[in-house]
Structure formats: C-alpha cells, structure tokens
Amino acid sequence: QNTKNLNGNVDFVKLYNKVGYLKTLNTPQRGVGRGGPAPRPGAMRPGGRPQQQEEEKKADTTEAKPAVNYFKIVGDQVLKLVMSVKKANLSYTQNNGIFLPGFLPEPDLFGLNFATSAPGFGFVMGDEADIRQLAMDNDWLTRDSLLNRAYAKKFTENFSYKINLEPIPGLRIDINADRTYSLNFSEYFRADSLGKFATFSPVEAGSFSMSYGMWKTSFVKARSDESSQLFEDMLANRSVIADRLALSNEQWVQEEPGYFYDSIGKANYPYGYGAISQEVVLYSFLAAYKGQDAKNISLNPFPKTPIPNWTINYNGLTKIPFIQRLFKTVNVTHAYRSAYSVNSWRTNVDYKADNTTQTYRNSNLYIPKYDLGQVTISEQFAPLFGIDLGLHNSLTARLEYKKQRSLTLSFTNNQLTEVVGDELIIGAGYRLRNLSFIVSSITGGNATRASNDLVLKLDLGFRTDKTTLRRIDEQNSQVSAGQRKINIYVTADYTFSNRLSMQAYFRRDMADPFVSSQFKNSNTAGGITMRFSLAQ
C-alpha cells in the first residue's frame, strides 16, 4: 500500500508585507490622528513656534487647504479588501492498497523474494498497479481451486481547504470545505480444476461525504398540517430529472422506448426512469432541498467540488465609545456547517455497463449502476446568532440561537426522514473575586485559608425537536417523534487549591412531546461534586 500527502500553507500577510506600500496599509496606525499624541497647551512645536501660533494659523481660512485625494482613499480601501485574505491551508491525502491472496513466494527482506524477485520492486515500493498477470506468468499464485479469499483493491481520497479572512479589524471569517471518497474493489480470482485462472463476482463498495450547502431552504418551514413545500417541490422535480436522465442515456436515445404512465407519480415518465427510480428520486431530492433548479442539478451521486462552510467571529464592537463604557468584552459569533453523505454504497450486481437499459425483473425501471441504500444531507447553524457579553463588574451574559436540520432519504422503503430542531440559550454568570474559606485538615494538621474566585452560572434552554416521516410513494407526512424542552442549569464552582475543587449544581429538564402516545415528563437533579487530583 502507499500514502500520498500534499499539504500547503500560505501566510498572505507575509506576502503582502514584501511590498512596501501594502506593508504600510497593513500596519496599524498608532497615536491620535496622523500626528501622534496631542501636545499640551502652550507647548513648542518643532522649529520653536508655540502651539497657539499653529492654532491661529489653522483658524485663517484664507489659506488654501490641501485637496482630498478621493482616488487614493478608494484605492486604499480596495487594496485592504483584497488583503482581507490572511491565511490559506490546503490538504490532500490519497491511500491505496492491494490484497492478493494465494501468493506463494516467501519474502526475504523488505517484502521481496530475492530468488524470484516476487512480487516485484514496484509492488513493495507501493505501486498500486495490478500484478496478477505478472504473478500468473511467473507462477507466484496457488492453483488451489478451493481458494475462497477475494482479491481486494482499496482507494481513499481526502481533500480539504481552509481560508482565513479579516475584512476589517476584529472581524474574522473562516471558510472551509472538505470531501472524502472511499472505494473498495473486490473480486474472486482463482484457478479452476484445470489450473486456469478466472475472475468471479466483481464488486465495488465504499462511502462518500463532503461539505454541502442548503442555506437557500434553511428557513422554509412545514405547514401546520405537517405538509412541506420542499417535499412537494421534490415530487414535482421527478419528471424533469427523469427526462434529463433518459436523454443522457445514449442507449435510451437510440432505442427510443418512449414514455409510460406512472401511477405513483401520476404523470408520464420516460421508460426506465419512473417516479420511484433511485436516480430520479435522488437528484429530485438534492435539487429541492438545496434550492437549485432541477434542470441544472448535477447528475452525479458523488460531486467533485465541495461547497464551502463558514464561521464568523467579531469582537470589535468595544471600539465604539458608548459600548466600551458599558461592556468589557463583546463577542458576536455565527457558524454554518452542512454535509452530504452516502454512508455505504456498492455497485449493483445486475448492472451491465454495456446494457444500461436493462430493467429489474417484472419492472419497467432500469437497473442503476450504484445501490446507495440511503443518503443524508444535514446542516447546523451553530449558532445562527450568538453573543457573549462581559461587563466591567464581573457579570457575564450570553445569548445563542441554534438551528439544525437532517434529511435522510431511504431507497429501500421510499421514505424521507426529516429531523428539525432549534434551540435558544440564555445564560448569565458572575464571578465573586477573592472569596476566602478556612480549610481544616481531617488528620489534625494545620488549617489553611483558600482565597479564590467563586464562579456562578445560570443557563436557560428552550429546545424544539421534531421528526417527520414523508412517504414518497404515498405522498403523505406524519410526525413520529419530537418534543419541546425547557432546561434550567445552575452551577457554582470554587477551587480550593490546585488539587481540590468543588461544584454545586442544580438541573431541571421539562419535556412536552408532540406525539400523543408519549407523556409529558420532567427530571430534576442536584448535588455537590468534589474533584481531587493526584497529579503534580
């Protein structure tokens, strides 16, 4: 096997600073205005002139003022915007491996047999080329017809990148994307009773995931009767996707099998691509929930280009004078993550590459190349909006609103499972500084005084979760699980020493389920925990 790695890091700030003018723009200005700290009244200017004379000179409006260079101002701002890209990181990893059962020569050193040069210098150095023909020609393989272990070839590819931007001081934007694809090929390769080698039952299987984007439909809610506009869009997309798939299939175009009335889709569909065809449903689903036109969505179950996600942090509000008087720190956060994943896929054993219009038995649906089982797209605003406040009197407060959504499409039962949730968190805290306690020894030793901060925290959480099952063949929706929850969590933490700490806590959880077969419930917990560390 072999592993290939490619990693790249670029610090654009160092690159910008190699240009003198750009370095000047990147250097924070110090002092008051352009002239540094303001001089004291009556102070002497360079050259011996007092400040009063300078001020009288400024008051003389008859003197011509320097012209404002608006072109330079605009140009500088454009350059600063371009230089908002601070760092970039790229990573690519590829893993390859081959397993060849029935190999006879014993290795002498580094996996190589010196007498026969088996399995070849390239193979032991990680070359992923298929050596089965070479092994047959040199009689390196057993001719046992009962060999029951499959030849396997593995391939894994990981790609990711991250870009850091700072458009204005205090505003940090992190953009990232990733893609992971794995392929495991296996087939039986053995000799028959006459010693002639042949292959049997080739199968490809693997998994796939990549960063995705569903923000266009993030705030589309279900109706009061649990019906969904997005689900209806998905069903409507099927006829468009079916036509695209048919026209992209050269054999379908040549054979011209025509259309048929699909009783499930209640419309005419091209032969081989019905309303519950795996490919038709998949791309209709992705187009609807991504918010993309079904005429433009990619017809590839494993897209090549990951869609970027982002995290935004801003801590520059305290530079505003009236906010600075009220708060010591103000941090605003926002983050978006989304993913598209196929947990397990495999090639369909009945699929024939030279006969793409082959149908299932007793069906008018074509056999797709891949059997996907189920696919999932998900997203999290973690948070959609968050703010942390620190006051000058040691009081802290925070507010967070989170939102999440997960959609799992199963092709085995033609069902879409939709899980949505949102959560509002309101928190407050206070630090009592230098609170003293006398700690007595239980063994009769001298008492010691502990003087540390007592940290008090209160969190209120309001969360809603709902799971809805949407049947594609029956075109109906039903809530299967979910609840509204209220959480109250209070803690008090105190550190007596670098080894001993204590926490008093109280927690109250209340849940009101959406399903009538479940009941309201609540849980209450409280107590004191002591932590003693033996580490030095």
Image: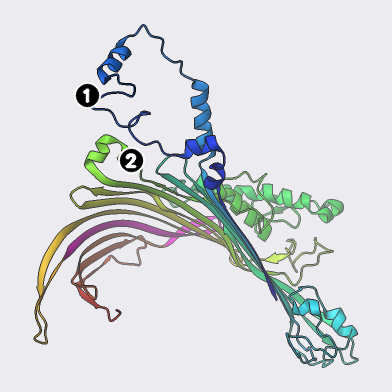
Q: Secondary structure at mark 2?
A: helix
- Category of crowding for the residue at label 1, using alpha-carbon neighbours closer than 10 angstroms: few (below 14), some (14–19), many (at least 20): few
Q: Main secondary structure of the magenta part?
A: strand
Q: Which picture quadrant has residue 168?
A: top left
Give, as a three-letter code, the residue at label 2.
Leu
Residue at x 51%, y 55% (from the top left corner):
338
Q: Which residues are magenta?
A: 452-480
191 left or right of 271 in image = right
Give, as a three-letter code, the residue at label 1.
Pro
Q: Which numbered disc flags the more N-terminal residue, 1 or 2?
A: 1
The image position of residue 254, as x and y in percent, is 86, 52
Q: Secondary structure at mark 1?
A: loop
The image position of residue 454, as x and y in percent, is 17, 63
Residue 41 is tagged as 1
Residue assigned mark 2: 317
Residue 31 is tagged as none
Could one spot residue 277 in this view of the protein?
no
Could one spot residue 145 in this view of the protein?
yes
